[in-house]
Amino acid sequence: MTLLQGHFFGGAFNTALELSSTEEFCGSCHKNVYQEMKPTIHFTNPSGVRVTCHDCHVPHKLTDKIARKMQASKEIWADLVGSIDTPEKFEAKDRELAGHE
């Protein structure tokens, strides 16, 4: 791998990590959780500072972030194959999934 290819891969990898840490990305599967958060102090507060999902649920150290993203890929797969694709199925596995956090 050339230096240029390494920089390109590293940049693309980091971009993918950052894009998969947005509220829009997380909220696409965690619809119920995201809706539950909206009326709380996390979403809106007098100071105007907002806490987002990744502030607490995505590790900030790169190696830990990569490990968590690998674990989360199984959850994305579960949504794609239909094992948590409805609110009822998601709620049934909510405790188990929350244990990963």
Image (tube, grey):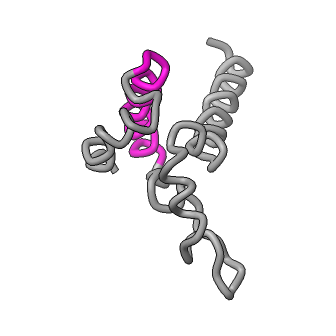
Q: Quadrant of residue 8?
A: top right
Residue 88 lies within the magenta run: no
Who's the residue at 69% across and 21% down the image? 3
Residue 26 x %, y %: 56, 43
Compared to residue 85, the image places residue 90 above or below, namely: below
Seen in the image, is 90 located left or right of residue 5? left
- In this view, which residue lies farthest toward the top? 1
Task: Please state if 53 lies on the left or on the right of 7 as rendered.
Answer: left
On the image, the x and y values in percent for residue 80 come to: 49, 19
Point out the stretch of residues depicted in magenta: 62-82
Q: Is residue 1 rendered to the left or right of residue 90?
A: right
Measured along the vertical axis of the image, is residue 56 above or below residue 40?
above
Q: Position of residue 46 (x, y in %)?
A: 67, 87
Front residue of 56/85: it is 85
Q: Residue at x 36, y 33 (%)?
A: 89
Residue 83 position in % (x across, y down): 37, 23
Labels in figure, total: 0
Residue in view at x 48 percent, y 53 percent? 33
Q: Quadrant of the N terminus?
A: top right
